[in-house]
Image (spheres, rainbow, N blue to C red):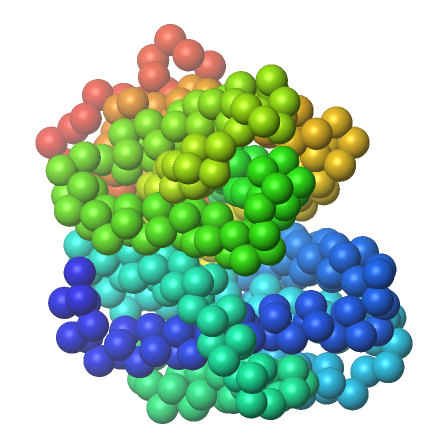
Protein backbone atom coordinates (compact mmCIF):
# COMPACT_ATOMS: atom_id res chain seq x y z
CA UNK A 1 0.00 0.00 0.00
CA UNK A 2 2.92 2.37 0.67
CA UNK A 3 3.99 2.11 -2.99
CA UNK A 4 1.63 4.99 -3.81
CA UNK A 5 3.97 7.27 -1.84
CA UNK A 6 6.51 6.94 -4.65
CA UNK A 7 4.42 9.55 -6.45
CA UNK A 8 6.13 12.77 -5.33
CA UNK A 9 3.04 14.97 -5.70
CA UNK A 10 0.82 12.62 -3.73
CA UNK A 11 3.55 12.09 -1.11
CA UNK A 12 3.64 15.82 -0.40
CA UNK A 13 -0.15 16.10 -0.34
CA UNK A 14 -0.39 13.15 2.06
CA UNK A 15 2.22 14.76 4.31
CA UNK A 16 0.15 17.97 4.25
CA UNK A 17 -2.92 15.98 5.28
CA UNK A 18 -1.08 14.26 8.14
CA UNK A 19 0.37 17.44 9.67
CA UNK A 20 -2.97 19.25 9.36
CA UNK A 21 -4.80 16.34 11.02
CA UNK A 22 -2.27 16.25 13.85
CA UNK A 23 -2.84 19.93 14.45
CA UNK A 24 -6.59 19.42 14.39
CA UNK A 25 -6.29 16.70 17.03
CA UNK A 26 -4.34 19.05 19.30
CA UNK A 27 -7.00 21.71 18.82
CA UNK A 28 -9.73 19.27 19.87
CA UNK A 29 -8.03 18.71 23.25
CA UNK A 30 -7.24 22.40 23.71
CA UNK A 31 -10.78 23.43 22.85
CA UNK A 32 -12.18 21.10 25.52
CA UNK A 33 -9.93 22.72 28.13
CA UNK A 34 -10.76 26.22 26.90
CA UNK A 35 -14.49 25.45 27.15
CA UNK A 36 -14.01 24.26 30.73
CA UNK A 37 -12.15 27.45 31.63
CA UNK A 38 -14.89 29.63 30.16
CA UNK A 39 -18.01 27.66 31.10
CA UNK A 40 -17.06 25.31 33.95
CA UNK A 41 -19.86 22.78 34.46
CA UNK A 42 -21.49 23.92 31.21
CA UNK A 43 -18.41 22.94 29.17
CA UNK A 44 -20.22 19.94 27.64
CA UNK A 45 -22.98 22.20 26.37
CA UNK A 46 -20.40 24.55 24.85
CA UNK A 47 -18.63 21.68 23.11
CA UNK A 48 -21.95 20.25 21.91
CA UNK A 49 -22.88 23.60 20.38
CA UNK A 50 -19.44 23.88 18.78
CA UNK A 51 -19.90 20.41 17.27
CA UNK A 52 -23.31 21.39 15.91
CA UNK A 53 -21.78 24.53 14.37
CA UNK A 54 -19.09 22.37 12.77
CA UNK A 55 -21.69 20.14 11.11
CA UNK A 56 -23.83 23.11 10.09
CA UNK A 57 -20.81 24.74 8.41
CA UNK A 58 -19.99 21.52 6.58
CA UNK A 59 -23.56 21.11 5.36
CA UNK A 60 -24.05 24.68 4.16
CA UNK A 61 -20.60 25.82 3.01
CA UNK A 62 -19.36 22.71 1.18
CA UNK A 63 -21.78 22.96 -1.81
CA UNK A 64 -20.80 26.61 -2.32
CA UNK A 65 -17.15 25.63 -2.18
CA UNK A 66 -17.73 22.90 -4.74
CA UNK A 67 -19.35 25.43 -7.06
CA UNK A 68 -16.26 27.62 -6.93
CA UNK A 69 -13.49 25.03 -6.73
CA UNK A 70 -13.10 24.38 -10.45
CA UNK A 71 -13.16 28.11 -11.25
CA UNK A 72 -10.30 29.01 -8.91
CA UNK A 73 -6.63 27.95 -9.02
CA UNK A 74 -6.62 24.76 -6.93
CA UNK A 75 -3.31 25.37 -5.18
CA UNK A 76 -4.17 28.96 -4.24
CA UNK A 77 -7.53 27.84 -2.86
CA UNK A 78 -6.00 25.12 -0.66
CA UNK A 79 -3.19 27.34 0.62
CA UNK A 80 -5.54 30.22 1.44
CA UNK A 81 -7.83 27.91 3.44
CA UNK A 82 -4.87 26.55 5.41
CA UNK A 83 -3.76 30.10 6.19
CA UNK A 84 -7.30 31.03 7.23
CA UNK A 85 -7.46 28.06 9.59
CA UNK A 86 -4.08 28.92 11.11
CA UNK A 87 -5.21 32.51 11.72
CA UNK A 88 -8.41 31.40 13.46
CA UNK A 89 -6.75 28.94 15.85
CA UNK A 90 -4.11 31.52 16.80
CA UNK A 91 -6.97 33.78 17.92
CA UNK A 92 -8.65 31.15 20.11
CA UNK A 93 -6.34 31.50 23.16
CA UNK A 94 -7.33 35.17 23.45
CA UNK A 95 -11.11 34.75 23.67
CA UNK A 96 -12.87 35.67 26.89
CA UNK A 97 -16.51 34.91 26.02
CA UNK A 98 -18.28 31.75 24.89
CA UNK A 99 -19.88 33.50 21.91
CA UNK A 100 -16.40 34.36 20.63
CA UNK A 101 -15.54 30.64 20.67
CA UNK A 102 -18.65 29.93 18.59
CA UNK A 103 -17.77 32.61 16.03
CA UNK A 104 -14.19 31.39 15.60
CA UNK A 105 -15.24 27.75 15.40
CA UNK A 106 -17.73 28.64 12.67
CA UNK A 107 -14.96 30.37 10.68
CA UNK A 108 -12.57 27.48 11.26
CA UNK A 109 -15.02 24.82 10.11
CA UNK A 110 -16.19 26.91 7.15
CA UNK A 111 -12.56 27.01 5.98
CA UNK A 112 -12.31 23.24 6.42
CA UNK A 113 -15.55 22.80 4.47
CA UNK A 114 -13.88 24.58 1.54
CA UNK A 115 -10.51 22.85 1.90
CA UNK A 116 -11.53 19.21 2.30
CA UNK A 117 -13.70 18.64 -0.82
CA UNK A 118 -11.21 20.54 -3.00
CA UNK A 119 -8.39 18.40 -1.58
CA UNK A 120 -10.40 15.21 -2.14
CA UNK A 121 -11.13 16.17 -5.75
CA UNK A 122 -7.41 16.77 -6.40
CA UNK A 123 -6.23 13.26 -5.44
CA UNK A 124 -7.92 11.36 -8.33
CA UNK A 125 -6.31 13.82 -10.76
CA UNK A 126 -2.90 13.17 -9.20
CA UNK A 127 -3.49 9.38 -9.14
CA UNK A 128 -5.62 8.48 -12.18
CA UNK A 129 -4.80 4.75 -11.95
CA UNK A 130 -7.48 2.83 -10.01
CA UNK A 131 -5.20 0.76 -7.78
CA UNK A 132 -3.05 3.72 -6.77
CA UNK A 133 -6.14 5.77 -5.94
CA UNK A 134 -7.53 2.92 -3.83
CA UNK A 135 -4.27 2.76 -1.88
CA UNK A 136 -4.45 6.52 -1.36
CA UNK A 137 -7.98 6.21 0.05
CA UNK A 138 -6.80 3.56 2.50
CA UNK A 139 -3.86 5.72 3.56
CA UNK A 140 -6.23 8.63 4.11
CA UNK A 141 -8.45 6.45 6.31
CA UNK A 142 -5.39 5.37 8.28
CA UNK A 143 -4.36 9.00 8.72
CA UNK A 144 -7.75 9.89 10.22
CA UNK A 145 -7.66 6.88 12.56
CA UNK A 146 -4.10 7.52 13.67
CA UNK A 147 -4.97 11.15 14.35
CA UNK A 148 -7.78 10.08 16.67
CA UNK A 149 -5.39 7.78 18.55
CA UNK A 150 -2.08 9.66 18.46
CA UNK A 151 -3.19 13.27 18.92
CA UNK A 152 -4.54 12.80 22.49
CA UNK A 153 -1.27 11.07 23.47
CA UNK A 154 0.78 13.89 21.94
CA UNK A 155 -1.44 16.47 23.62
CA UNK A 156 -1.00 14.77 26.99
CA UNK A 157 2.79 14.81 26.56
CA UNK A 158 2.79 18.50 25.62
CA UNK A 159 0.50 19.44 28.49
CA UNK A 160 3.09 18.07 30.90
CA UNK A 161 5.46 20.75 29.60
CA UNK A 162 3.39 23.76 28.47
CA UNK A 163 -0.03 25.37 29.15
CA UNK A 164 -2.92 24.15 26.99
CA UNK A 165 -3.01 27.44 25.06
CA UNK A 166 0.23 26.36 23.40
CA UNK A 167 -1.65 23.47 21.80
CA UNK A 168 -3.37 26.02 19.58
CA UNK A 169 0.09 27.14 18.45
CA UNK A 170 0.83 23.53 17.52
CA UNK A 171 -2.41 23.43 15.54
CA UNK A 172 -1.48 26.60 13.65
CA UNK A 173 1.95 25.15 12.94
CA UNK A 174 0.28 22.09 11.41
CA UNK A 175 -1.87 24.23 9.13
CA UNK A 176 1.11 26.39 8.13
CA UNK A 177 3.18 23.29 7.34
CA UNK A 178 0.30 21.98 5.24
CA UNK A 179 0.11 25.30 3.38
CA UNK A 180 3.85 25.23 2.69
CA UNK A 181 3.73 21.66 1.37
CA UNK A 182 0.81 22.45 -0.93
CA UNK A 183 2.35 25.75 -2.06
CA UNK A 184 5.57 24.01 -3.15
CA UNK A 185 3.78 21.17 -4.98
CA UNK A 186 2.80 21.32 -8.63
CA UNK A 187 -0.88 20.40 -8.82
CA UNK A 188 -2.83 19.47 -11.97
CA UNK A 189 -5.15 22.12 -13.27
CA UNK A 190 -8.89 21.41 -12.98
CA UNK A 191 -10.30 19.83 -16.17
CA UNK A 192 -12.08 22.07 -18.63
CA UNK A 193 -15.89 21.88 -18.47
CA UNK A 194 -15.97 20.77 -22.09
CA UNK A 195 -19.43 20.72 -23.67
CA UNK A 196 -21.20 21.76 -20.50
CA UNK A 197 -22.67 25.26 -20.70
CA UNK A 198 -21.45 27.95 -18.32
CA UNK A 199 -23.61 27.99 -15.20
CA UNK A 200 -24.46 30.80 -12.86
CA UNK A 201 -23.45 30.42 -9.24
CA UNK A 202 -26.84 29.22 -7.87
CA UNK A 203 -26.97 26.52 -10.54
CA UNK A 204 -23.40 25.50 -9.80
CA UNK A 205 -24.18 25.26 -6.08
CA UNK A 206 -27.06 22.90 -6.85
CA UNK A 207 -25.09 20.93 -9.44
CA UNK A 208 -23.32 18.55 -7.07
CA UNK A 209 -26.48 17.71 -5.13
CA UNK A 210 -28.37 17.13 -8.39
CA UNK A 211 -25.67 14.79 -9.67
CA UNK A 212 -25.71 12.82 -6.41
CA UNK A 213 -29.50 12.45 -6.39
CA UNK A 214 -29.65 11.54 -10.10
CA UNK A 215 -27.01 8.78 -9.95
CA UNK A 216 -28.18 5.49 -8.40
CA UNK A 217 -24.83 4.49 -6.91
CA UNK A 218 -24.40 7.95 -5.36
CA UNK A 219 -27.89 7.81 -3.85
CA UNK A 220 -26.84 4.46 -2.38
CA UNK A 221 -23.65 6.07 -1.08
CA UNK A 222 -25.79 8.61 0.79
CA UNK A 223 -27.77 5.77 2.36
CA UNK A 224 -24.49 4.12 3.37
CA UNK A 225 -23.36 7.40 4.95
CA UNK A 226 -26.54 7.36 7.04
CA UNK A 227 -25.77 3.82 8.24
CA UNK A 228 -22.22 4.77 9.23
CA UNK A 229 -23.36 7.97 10.94
CA UNK A 230 -25.95 6.06 12.98
CA UNK A 231 -23.37 3.54 14.21
CA UNK A 232 -20.61 6.11 14.65
CA UNK A 233 -22.85 8.40 16.72
CA UNK A 234 -23.44 5.60 19.23
CA UNK A 235 -19.69 5.13 19.57
CA UNK A 236 -18.68 8.79 19.74
CA UNK A 237 -21.57 10.06 21.86
CA UNK A 238 -22.42 7.12 24.15
CA UNK A 239 -18.99 5.66 24.92
CA UNK A 240 -18.35 7.82 27.98
CA UNK A 241 -21.77 6.94 29.44
CA UNK A 242 -21.32 3.22 28.76
CA UNK A 243 -17.82 3.09 30.23
CA UNK A 244 -18.35 5.29 33.30
CA UNK A 245 -21.98 4.64 34.30
CA UNK A 246 -23.04 1.33 32.77
CA UNK A 247 -19.76 -0.53 33.35
CA UNK A 248 -18.54 1.57 36.27
CA UNK A 249 -15.00 1.85 34.91
CA UNK A 250 -12.50 4.69 35.20
CA UNK A 251 -12.12 7.67 32.88
CA UNK A 252 -8.87 6.16 31.59
CA UNK A 253 -10.89 3.38 29.95
CA UNK A 254 -12.82 5.80 27.71
CA UNK A 255 -9.92 6.31 25.26
CA UNK A 256 -9.28 2.54 25.34
CA UNK A 257 -12.82 1.91 24.11
CA UNK A 258 -12.45 4.55 21.40
CA UNK A 259 -9.08 3.02 20.57
CA UNK A 260 -10.78 -0.33 19.87
CA UNK A 261 -13.06 1.44 17.38
CA UNK A 262 -10.03 3.05 15.71
CA UNK A 263 -8.09 -0.21 15.68
CA UNK A 264 -10.89 -1.98 13.80
CA UNK A 265 -11.01 0.85 11.29
CA UNK A 266 -7.25 0.79 10.71
CA UNK A 267 -7.12 -2.99 10.30
CA UNK A 268 -9.70 -2.89 7.51
CA UNK A 269 -8.07 0.13 5.84
CA UNK A 270 -4.86 -1.91 5.57
CA UNK A 271 -6.67 -4.88 4.02
CA UNK A 272 -9.02 -3.04 1.66
CA UNK A 273 -6.72 -2.42 -1.34
CA UNK A 274 -6.29 -6.17 -1.79
CA UNK A 275 -9.96 -6.91 -1.10
CA UNK A 276 -11.14 -4.33 -3.63
CA UNK A 277 -8.91 -5.97 -6.23
CA UNK A 278 -11.03 -9.11 -5.90
CA UNK A 279 -14.54 -7.76 -5.20
CA UNK A 280 -16.43 -4.76 -6.51
CA UNK A 281 -17.21 -1.71 -4.40
CA UNK A 282 -20.90 -2.54 -4.03
CA UNK A 283 -20.29 -6.02 -2.62
CA UNK A 284 -17.78 -4.79 -0.03
CA UNK A 285 -19.65 -1.67 1.05
CA UNK A 286 -23.20 -3.02 1.21
CA UNK A 287 -22.22 -6.19 3.06
CA UNK A 288 -20.24 -4.17 5.57
CA UNK A 289 -23.21 -1.83 6.02
CA UNK A 290 -25.39 -4.71 7.20
CA UNK A 291 -22.80 -5.54 9.87
CA UNK A 292 -23.41 -2.14 11.51
CA UNK A 293 -27.06 -2.69 12.58
CA UNK A 294 -26.20 -6.27 13.54
CA UNK A 295 -23.49 -5.10 15.95
CA UNK A 296 -25.76 -2.40 17.39
CA UNK A 297 -28.52 -4.99 17.90
CA UNK A 298 -26.09 -7.17 19.87
CA UNK A 299 -25.17 -4.13 21.97
CA UNK A 300 -28.82 -3.32 22.65
CA UNK A 301 -29.57 -6.93 23.63
CA UNK A 302 -26.54 -7.01 25.92
CA UNK A 303 -27.64 -3.81 27.65
CA UNK A 304 -31.36 -4.63 27.88
CA UNK A 305 -31.27 -6.83 31.04
CA UNK A 306 -29.56 -4.05 32.99
CA UNK A 307 -26.12 -2.58 33.67
CA UNK A 308 -24.81 -5.77 35.24
CA UNK A 309 -25.35 -7.76 32.04
CA UNK A 310 -22.86 -5.72 30.00
CA UNK A 311 -19.18 -6.62 29.94
CA UNK A 312 -16.02 -4.68 29.18
CA UNK A 313 -14.64 -7.26 26.69
CA UNK A 314 -18.03 -7.35 24.98
CA UNK A 315 -18.05 -3.56 24.54
CA UNK A 316 -14.52 -3.61 23.12
CA UNK A 317 -15.48 -6.37 20.68
CA UNK A 318 -18.56 -4.50 19.45
CA UNK A 319 -16.57 -1.28 19.04
CA UNK A 320 -13.87 -3.17 17.12
CA UNK A 321 -16.50 -4.60 14.74
CA UNK A 322 -18.20 -1.22 14.28
CA UNK A 323 -14.87 0.42 13.44
CA UNK A 324 -14.00 -2.31 10.92
CA UNK A 325 -17.40 -2.23 9.21
CA UNK A 326 -17.50 1.57 9.13
CA UNK A 327 -14.08 1.69 7.49
CA UNK A 328 -15.15 -0.88 4.88
CA UNK A 329 -18.10 1.36 3.99
CA UNK A 330 -16.35 4.74 4.05
CA UNK A 331 -12.94 4.06 2.52
CA UNK A 332 -14.05 3.06 -1.02
CA UNK A 333 -16.46 6.01 -1.20
CA UNK A 334 -14.00 8.14 -3.15
CA UNK A 335 -13.78 5.44 -5.84
CA UNK A 336 -17.55 5.50 -6.21
CA UNK A 337 -17.60 9.29 -6.53
CA UNK A 338 -14.75 9.31 -9.05
CA UNK A 339 -16.42 6.85 -11.41
CA UNK A 340 -19.71 8.78 -11.21
CA UNK A 341 -18.68 12.20 -12.56
CA UNK A 342 -16.60 13.87 -15.24
CA UNK A 343 -13.38 15.50 -14.10
CA UNK A 344 -14.80 19.02 -14.31
CA UNK A 345 -17.72 18.06 -12.07
CA UNK A 346 -15.69 16.16 -9.47
CA UNK A 347 -15.26 19.11 -7.05
CA UNK A 348 -19.02 19.72 -7.03
CA UNK A 349 -19.81 16.04 -6.43
CA UNK A 350 -17.20 15.64 -3.70
CA UNK A 351 -18.53 18.78 -2.04
CA UNK A 352 -22.14 17.57 -2.25
CA UNK A 353 -21.21 14.17 -0.81
CA UNK A 354 -19.23 15.91 1.97
CA UNK A 355 -22.20 18.12 2.79
CA UNK A 356 -24.89 15.43 2.66
CA UNK A 357 -22.86 12.91 4.66
CA UNK A 358 -22.35 15.47 7.43
CA UNK A 359 -26.08 16.18 7.36
CA UNK A 360 -26.46 12.53 8.41
CA UNK A 361 -24.13 13.13 11.36
CA UNK A 362 -26.04 16.29 12.22
CA UNK A 363 -29.11 14.07 12.60
CA UNK A 364 -27.53 11.16 14.46
CA UNK A 365 -25.29 13.01 16.94
CA UNK A 366 -28.11 14.71 18.88
CA UNK A 367 -30.40 11.69 18.46
CA UNK A 368 -27.85 9.39 20.13
CA UNK A 369 -27.27 11.87 22.95
CA UNK A 370 -30.93 12.56 23.67
CA UNK A 371 -31.89 8.88 23.63
CA UNK A 372 -28.96 7.80 25.81
CA UNK A 373 -29.65 10.52 28.38
CA UNK A 374 -33.43 10.14 28.42
CA UNK A 375 -34.10 6.45 27.78
CA UNK A 376 -30.73 4.78 28.32
CA UNK A 377 -27.93 3.39 26.13
CA UNK A 378 -29.89 0.25 25.22
CA UNK A 379 -32.67 2.31 23.62
CA UNK A 380 -30.11 4.55 21.92
CA UNK A 381 -28.36 1.52 20.42
CA UNK A 382 -31.67 -0.01 19.30
CA UNK A 383 -33.03 3.13 17.63
CA UNK A 384 -29.74 4.03 15.95
CA UNK A 385 -29.39 0.37 14.91
CA UNK A 386 -32.78 0.60 13.20
CA UNK A 387 -31.63 3.76 11.42
CA UNK A 388 -28.42 1.98 10.32
CA UNK A 389 -30.51 -0.92 9.03
CA UNK A 390 -32.66 1.53 7.07
CA UNK A 391 -29.51 2.94 5.46
CA UNK A 392 -28.13 -0.51 4.61
CA UNK A 393 -31.41 -1.71 3.09
CA UNK A 394 -31.77 1.54 1.17
CA UNK A 395 -28.28 1.19 -0.27
CA UNK A 396 -28.90 -2.41 -1.33
CA UNK A 397 -32.08 -1.38 -3.15
CA UNK A 398 -30.75 1.83 -4.68
CA UNK A 399 -27.46 0.41 -5.99
CA UNK A 400 -28.08 -1.96 -8.92
CA UNK A 401 -26.31 -5.32 -8.67
CA UNK A 402 -25.20 -4.90 -12.26
CA UNK A 403 -23.55 -1.50 -12.36
CA UNK A 404 -21.21 -1.24 -15.36
CA UNK A 405 -19.31 1.97 -15.99
CA UNK A 406 -20.43 2.00 -19.64
CA UNK A 407 -24.13 2.07 -20.47
CA UNK A 408 -25.84 1.75 -23.83
CA UNK A 409 -28.49 4.44 -24.25
CA UNK A 410 -30.28 6.61 -26.76
CA UNK A 411 -30.45 10.35 -27.46
CA UNK A 412 -33.79 11.01 -29.18
CA UNK A 413 -33.56 14.69 -28.23
CA UNK A 414 -30.29 15.38 -30.13
CA UNK A 415 -30.21 16.23 -33.84
CA UNK A 416 -28.47 13.73 -36.10
CA UNK A 417 -25.49 16.03 -36.68
CA UNK A 418 -24.74 16.69 -33.01
CA UNK A 419 -20.99 16.25 -32.19
CA UNK A 420 -21.81 13.85 -29.33
CA UNK A 421 -23.29 11.39 -31.84
CA UNK A 422 -20.39 11.56 -34.28
CA UNK A 423 -19.37 8.08 -35.37
CA UNK A 424 -21.90 6.36 -33.15
CA UNK A 425 -25.40 7.56 -33.92
CA UNK A 426 -28.30 8.03 -31.51
CA UNK A 427 -27.80 4.51 -30.05
CA UNK A 428 -24.38 4.26 -28.47
CA UNK A 429 -22.43 3.19 -25.38
CA UNK A 430 -19.84 4.98 -23.26
CA UNK A 431 -18.91 5.68 -19.64
CA UNK A 432 -22.15 7.24 -18.41
CA UNK A 433 -22.28 10.29 -16.12
CA UNK A 434 -25.05 12.74 -15.40
CA UNK A 435 -24.11 15.96 -17.17
CA UNK A 436 -25.49 18.56 -19.59
CA UNK A 437 -26.13 15.92 -22.29
CA UNK A 438 -27.24 13.10 -19.95
CA UNK A 439 -29.76 14.53 -17.53
CA UNK A 440 -31.45 11.27 -16.47
CA UNK A 441 -30.08 7.87 -15.60
CA UNK A 442 -31.06 5.20 -18.14
CA UNK A 443 -33.27 2.42 -16.78
CA UNK A 444 -33.95 -1.07 -18.07
CA UNK A 445 -36.49 -1.61 -20.80
CA UNK A 446 -40.00 -1.91 -19.37
CA UNK A 447 -39.37 0.56 -16.54
CA UNK A 448 -40.25 4.21 -16.50
CA UNK A 449 -37.58 6.67 -17.67
CA UNK A 450 -35.03 6.78 -20.45
CA UNK A 451 -34.57 3.34 -21.97
CA UNK A 452 -31.24 1.52 -22.10
CA UNK A 453 -30.71 0.33 -25.63
CA UNK A 454 -28.84 -2.78 -26.62
CA UNK A 455 -25.10 -2.07 -26.86
CA UNK A 456 -23.84 -1.25 -30.31
CA UNK A 457 -20.39 -2.14 -31.53
CA UNK A 458 -19.42 1.49 -31.86
CA UNK A 459 -18.65 3.62 -28.88
CA UNK A 460 -18.63 7.30 -28.20
CA UNK A 461 -16.91 9.21 -25.47
CA UNK A 462 -19.02 11.67 -23.51
The residue shown at (44%, 83%) is 178
Regarding residue 60, the answer to whether it shows in the image is: no
Count of numbered labels shown in the rendering: 0
Residue 322 placement: quadrant: top left
The residue shown at (26%, 76%) is 11
Q: Position of residue 139 (x, y in %)?
A: 29, 62
On screen, 131 above or below 26?
Answer: above
On screen, 107 above or below 197?
Answer: below
The residue shown at (65%, 67%) is 109
On screen, 48 above or below 317?
Answer: below
Q: Quadrant of the N terminus?
A: bottom left
Residue 366 placement: quadrant: top right
On screen, 166 above or below 102?
Answer: below
Q: Position of residue 163 (x, y in %)?
A: 65, 87
Q: Position of residue 290 (x, y in %)?
A: 40, 25
User: In the visual, does 268 lie left or right of 130?
Assistant: right
User: In the visual, does 334 lie left or right of 22?
Assistant: left
Give whichever of 181, 26 is nearer the camera: 26
Amino acid sequence: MLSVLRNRTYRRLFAAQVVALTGTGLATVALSLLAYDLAGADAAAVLGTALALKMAAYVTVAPLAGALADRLPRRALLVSMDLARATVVLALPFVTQVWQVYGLILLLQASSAVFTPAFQATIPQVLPEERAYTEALSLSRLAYDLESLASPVLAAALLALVPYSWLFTGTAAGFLASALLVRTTALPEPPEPGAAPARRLPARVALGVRLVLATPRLRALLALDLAVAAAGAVVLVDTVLLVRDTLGRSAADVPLALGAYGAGSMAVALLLPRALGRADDRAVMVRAAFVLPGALALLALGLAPGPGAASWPGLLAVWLVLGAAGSAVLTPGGRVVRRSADGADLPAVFAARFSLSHACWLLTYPLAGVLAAGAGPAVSAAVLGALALLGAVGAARLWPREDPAELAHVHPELPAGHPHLAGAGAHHVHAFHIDALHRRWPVASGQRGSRISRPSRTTSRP
